[in-house]
Image: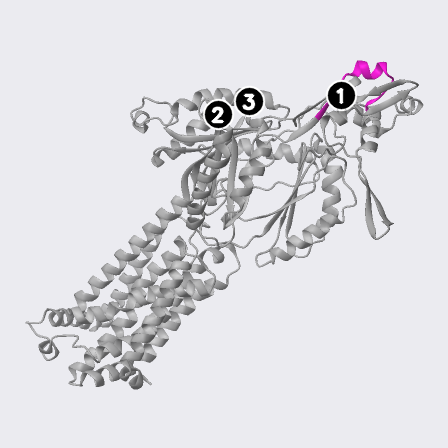
Amino acid sequence: MFERIIQHGILVTVTVLIVCVLGVTAALNIPVQMIPDLDIRVISVRTIWPGATPQDVEKEILIEQEDYLRNLPSLSRIVSTARSGQAEIELEFPFGTDITEMLIRVNNALSQVQSYPENVDEPQIYANSFSSNAFMFYSITPLPGNPRQLDMDLMLDFIEDNVKLRMSSVPGISEVYVRGGVERQIQILVDPARLAQRELSYDDIRQTIRNRNRDRSGGEIVSGKRQYLLRTIGRFDNIDALSQLILKRSGDTVIRLEDVATVSLDHSEKRDATYFNAEPNIFLALRRESGANVIDIKRAMLEEVAAINREVLEPVGLTVTLFADDVHYVEDSVRNVWQNLILGSLLATAVMFLFLRSLKATAVGVIGIPICIIVAFLGLLVSGRTLNVISLAGIAFAIGMTLDNSIVVLESIELARRRGLHAFEAALEGVRQVWPAVLASTLTTVLVFLPVAFVDLEVGQLYSDIGIAISAAILASMLVAITVLPTAAARLQLAPRASLVKPEGDGNPSGRLRESTLRAVSWLLATSRRRLGCILITCVISLAILIGLTPPAEYLPEGEEPKVFASMNAPPGYNLASMQAIAADLDRYLLPFVGDDPARFHRGEAEAPAFAYFNMRVAPDQIRIIAEPVDPRDINELMDSITRKYKEYPGMRAFAARGSIITSNDGGTRSINLDIAGPDLGAIYDVALAAYRRAEAVFDNPRIQTNPSSLALAQPMVEIRPDWDRAAELGLTADVLGFTVSALTDGSYVDEFFLADD
């Protein structure tokens, strides 16, 4: 077999070129991203019920949904959270679960819930994985000076209709998440006095609107040769028609809706607010599809955003700005690994030349490096992997290993040449003698790394790319060593003719080194005491290195990026206006540091490091800031300055963490989760608060986050307990009373209103 391979040098060359072309094509087409795609194991279900208390959310939504979701197969964990106006259920499944099938099962389970209260949105289902977190972040703000005096709260529908849709159409984008602004709403502001004067109730208005605001299909009629569809139109299509709705007719007197209320197109109640560098904005976060090339996505998105700015936003007085993205981290990381890969190849080549002392032999030996790298790319593409820092690290690790097989084969061929064999015979004899050892060594290495690719756990999914890259490169190095190298060696004079017969004596440095090494080994093996001493010394030194130089152990590396995620959690009972007042104070404190000179902080002239930007979200229970320092080295000081400012507000709890490419942005891989469970909710909160305070006392400057954000059950609540006997006398039901109370306070849902296409 080897004789035929060596004889057909052209065939070997063509085969290598074909493999290289395929590998280069694979390298150009393989998706590029920061880390490998991870299996999605968590499905979240979110249901919005505006204005509902947590108690009602639990009884009317969570309990109903849990009854059907808890029967899902392979479900390992279910966590339900009831908040004001919102229900969330998190479903966790084991590794290896077919998440597409589970999404279908979850949707089917939710469809079995018989009914929801009025004004409850349809449940939203999300499949979550930190490898698919948002990677590009945009901010939409008015043009400088806000020449059109735009209210950003009213721009949400415009952004979703004109910007979100165009961004979503960019290849590789799976979702555009929009935060900020409020939805448009038809508001009926009732005058209670005028309503009472006309002997009408809030429920009368509700029922009258619902009875009118309906379209009905009337079937079909046949007239002559034609068939017509019948449809009764009742839905309101403009505000004037709604205002003219007749509520009551008494004789010749007609009472219309406009007589007791004012109808207007406004926006729903504002429940949170977003700001970019203290300016109101609408925040957009982009998520990619699994396996998509983030670099290509960014290039396409930048072109699309430039067109959106020019064609859509600037004419109405808006602009969209990319203020943060993870793509440049990907580019920098990949570039860094490529540089290390090239440097490693050069060093390996230099070491090989140091021992072979022949440019031709070294060139033949290192020819396997680019071939093996190219084959590694081909292996990654065939196995459905991506080009990321993990897979590139595997290729870099494999460089030194790929030379081992080449050195063994070249040394065997060289020894055959020394025995006086012809070049062809030496190449054939050399590869025949060592190919079993090369095969055994290669398979041993492959069996060490390849099993990582079959581990279902998170670590296996992250580092399986290393196993695939190394295995492909090592297998390629074996094939190169037993085919390409002998074929080349049979046709090249690898070493000067004189060196083949030169004695290994004083005139040959390599011979002197070999003789010195052999004398030292012979001296160590001369007596049993020396042999035992050598073994003991080696073991002691190895153990000392193992104990003294082993780095601290952790589950996964940090993979940190210079970005801060800082949140301030408020006690129960705060409203949005109170939190916005605190946010305004934070703006006054933080804004002077945006774009500041980092040297001022280093000289002690500034209280906080220079900010590149800060994006703030304000909600009744929390203020969350995403910020980035101008100098990445100031990241820890930036976290400290924000949390220090947070703690100045009474009752607030602060938390800050660095961004991470490996895990979610809530503490990284070094965070420790403490789950507290039990039948008594009050006792659970007491234990959690005690654990929180104990951790603050024991650890030095700990960063502690809680879920839910508050550790108290002190949410103020006003309970209305009707006199049901009196209510029955007046003909009032629980539904009518509840609707009336809601309408008099926060406002209550009546029906849907279709305005144009909205």
Task: Tell which circle, 1 or 3, labels the residue nearer the N-terminal end.
Answer: 3
Residue 76 placed where, x, y %? 64, 52
Identify residue type, mark 3. Gln
Based on the picture, tell me whether residue 631 belongs to the magenta stretch: no
Q: Which residue is mark 1?
A: 744
Magenta-tinted stretch: 187-202
Residue 108: x percent and y percent? 71, 52
- Specify the label residue 670 is tagged with: none
Disc 1 residue type (three-letter): Leu
* SS at badge 3: helix
- Mark 1 → mark 2, Cα distance in angstroms: 33 Å
| Foreground disc of the pair 3, 2 | 2
Pick whichever of labels 1 and 2 is earlier in the sequence. 2
Residue 602 seen anywhere in this rendered image of the structure = yes
- Along the horizontal axis of the image, is 482 left or right of 569? left
Q: Secondary structure at mark 2?
A: strand
Of callouts 3 and 2, the N-terminal one = 2
Q: Quadrant of the C terminus?
A: top right
For the residues labelled 1 and 3, the Cα–Cα distance comes to 25 Å
The residue under the point 72% across, 26% down is 239
Residue 442 located left or right of residue 646: left
Q: Residue furthest front?
A: 224
**Residue that mark 2 sits on:** 279
Q: Which picture quadrant has residue 449? A: bottom left
The residue identified by callout 3 is 580
Q: Secondary structure at mark 1?
A: helix
* Disc 2 residue type (three-letter): Glu
The answer to whether 225 is drawn above or below residue 286 in the figure is below
Determine whether 21 is above or below 251 in the image: below
